[in-house]
Image (tube, coloured by chain):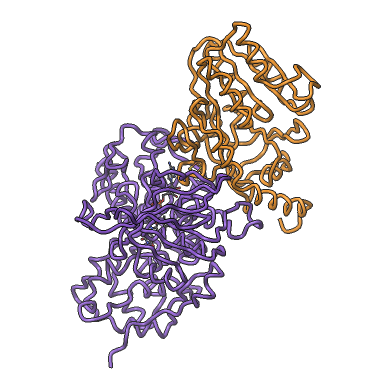
Amino acid sequence: MKTPRQKMAEQDPQERIANFDEVPYGYTPEQAQAEAARCLQCQKAPCRAGCPVEIDIPAFILAIREGDFAAAREKLLETNSLPAVCGRVCPQEDQCEKVCVLAKKGDPVAIGTLERFAADWKDGEEADPEAGSAPEKAKVAVIGAGPAGLTAAADLARMGYRVTIFEALHRPGGVLVYGIPEFRLPKAIVFEEVEKVKKMGVELELNQVVGATLSVEELFDSGFEAVFVGTGAGLPRFMGIPGENLNGVYSANEYLTRVNLMKAFRFPEYDTPVIRGEKVCVIGGGNVAMDSARTALRLGAEEVTIVYRRSRAEAPARVEEVHHAEQEGVIFKFLTLPLKYLDDGNGWIRGMECQGMELGEPDDSGRRRPVPVPGTEFTIDCDLAVVAIGNDPNPLLPRALPELELGWKGTIVADPETGAASVPGVFAGGDIATGAATVIEAMGAGKKAARGIDRYLSARKS
Amino acid sequence: MYRIVEQERLTPEAVRLRIEAPRIARRRQAGQFVVIRVDEKGERIPLTIVGSDPEAGTITLVVQEVGTSTRKLGRLRAGEAILDLTGPLGRPTEVKKWGRVACLAGGIGTAEVLPVVEAVRAAGNTTLAIVGARTRELLILEDEMRAAADGLYITTDDGSYGRHGVVTDVLLDLINDGAVPDRVYAIGPVPMMKAVADLTRPYGIPTEISLNALMVDGTGMCGCCRVTVGGETKFTCVDGPDFDAHQVDFDELVQRQKIYLGQEKRSLEEYEKCAGGCRR
Ligand SMILES: Cc1cc2nc3c(=O)[nH]c(=O)nc-3n(C[C@H](O)[C@H](O)[C@H](O)COP(=O)(O)OP(=O)(O)OC[C@H]3O[C@@H](n4cnc5c(N)ncnc54)[C@H](O)[C@@H]3O)c2cc1C
Ligand code: FES
């Protein structure tokens, strides 16, 4: 009989909404080996092509099957500097697992969960990641310590470059530390992954806003020969409807930053406060909306409703995230558009006026455009609203380097293969170049840019 | 870590700190601020840069001890350090040659207006400083201000020093005496800035104010600091902190500053209970 795809054990939904601990527990070694045995070890391995950071997927799975978990871990680290992160937050269902040969007839191999298992494996023999063999190579500056910047830095260090990361916040990780919640990605894991990057010889300077604390020009003047910009898409969008600045209306960035980065869920032990709503509305249909809704539950909300203007099929959130939110009791109102926030008379939100929508003709994104249905206006009561309708690139750095060519919504125009931007020596990748996307795409861009920088600097030398 | 090289108590509720931050000392301009986090459990709060010494690599901050974070700061001594400090943030204050400029400040705003007075005067303007305090003992930086401005007017709410009254009384007198300033700059508590805006509006005097919105990151990432200016939403930390006083929605600003009043009180109670050093 064929082994079915192995499922991770999870915290019970009723229990987990009262804590911030991680929801899935990961595989046991037995489960991991059983799952690894399902892999056909295809010669042409389509899964590899589905992976933006080119992990040798069959090889690491084979090592798991053979019980050599440490070897599996080392295999991952050859190409992926943040495997414990990727194993948790990548949309594998759209990438490696989507093209898995087994997916044609049934369930694909659980590549993501296996990655998580191997990356988490600890046997006290974790080899210190190798610093480059020729550390006398040029100095490269990386701006932003999100997935794009960390990957570019690690790969450049591996090639022997002397790398310094300049990060605006007081902690490295980008969205991994301020956006994605603890129950989905424990911060201790991000910390460990960053430590590995540092052990490769990468210097990390925190609290440095490039464009404010120091300029790109100063970086070049102080001996950096190339600069990688991985500053992300950190500018929250609002809808521009009445009442948006009422007390009790947050951007998802603010809400999640207070809770994740500043640990407001442990207020007053930690000094940063956060509003704990009883009836919470979250606006949006992506991962950010799911994270916000599930955070609200854990902060004690009685009722959490996600309001999204399209239907379930168009929601960009990962299936697993929607599923987890539903399990935990989040209510979904699809085809619903907020029109305005209502004032309780004291400057606080008391509810939201909404309108029903239906799907019309496809729009630019290829999804059917939601159109208002007249006469369907209604009111939802809430004392907290979280706006999770997306982020645009942060303009701070582009403003400070006006020569940079910018694209749609202020993204930095960069060659998708080399990361090269319009200013010589400046490279860019991740959300700042593509607009808000995924962790793994940002990492892939960091990887390509590292190669692009290597080629650029080698050519300059000769 | 950012080391404190000098600490000086100015009043029972305010201290001046000189802190090592060489990159910021080199680049900061009038009107800009830093975001600091005192310790591992601390929040991120914005503080105006009052001055800097690029040679020594230090910046000066003046802190009024009103909440948990500022009390923590007030307890730090020379030789101790602040965990995180970022800046200089915000757009610098616009400085041009206008002619006569009146700079008004209330309370701790006196420290914050000092770099603006210096910059405005350096640009060739006749610069008047009008500063107010509740009472004499709370007046700060009088000597520095006297040195920086072409003229200094002092008011106290209780009449214990300078003129009995508020800063707008002085401004109104100037206007009535025909000495109408070409430009007004104000920084202080919201009711004071609103009073300044209301006073100068009918005379059409261009008036800039520096807004003290709540902040988290200070880099435009969260939107905590949003204000309505001229009917549009702006982020104080990147679009400001200076805005046209006649365009600012003060009622909303006042409202938003109250969001965490309850929590702030609770946090301070917890902190004071433990201030001798229990779990912190
Ligand atoms: C709540 C949330 C949940 C998400 N969930 C998922 C998920 O499940 N799976 C997934 O694949 N993707 C997810 N994403 C998207 C993913 O996190 C991003 O696509 C990814 O982090 C982008 O990486 P980056 O390195 O380009 O930018 P970021 O992670 O945004 O990092 C940019 C870094 O640069 C710093 N910076 C900015 N400006 C400056 C400056 N001027 N000087 C110095 N430093 C600067 C920032 O502080 C930040 O640390 C989620 C995003 C959010 C917000
Ligand atoms: S403080 Fe976060 S955007 Fe201004």
Relative placement, left or right, of B75 versus A207 is: right
Image coordinates of residue B203 in percent, x first then y, are 53, 14
Q: Residue at x 67, y 26 (%)?
A: B106
Q: Quadrant of the N terminus of chain A?
A: bottom left
Q: Quadrant of the C terminus of chain A?
A: top left
Q: Residue at x 27, y 59 (%)?
A: A358
Residue projecting furthest to the right: B160
> Looking at the rendering, which quadrant does residue A289 occupy?
bottom left
On the question of residue B197 being in view, the answer is yes
Decide which of A435, A42 is in the foreground and name it: A435
Image coordinates of residue A11 in percent, x first then y, are 49, 76
Residue projecting furthest to the bottom: A1
* Above or below for A231 versus B58: below
* Above or below for B118 versus A62: above
The colour with which the image depicts chain A is purple
Image coordinates of residue B183 in percent, x first then y, are 53, 16
Image coordinates of residue A164 in percent, x first then y, are 44, 46
Decide which of A111, A387 is in the foreground and name it: A387
* Above or below for B119 versus A108: above
Relative placement, left or right, of A433 versus A340 is: left
Decide which of B144, A366 is in the foreground and name it: A366
Q: Which chain is orange?
A: B
On the question of residue A132 being in view, the answer is no
> Looking at the rendering, which quadrant does residue A114 occupy?
bottom left
Please tell me how many numbered marks the rendered image carries. 0
Residue projecting furthest to the top: B178
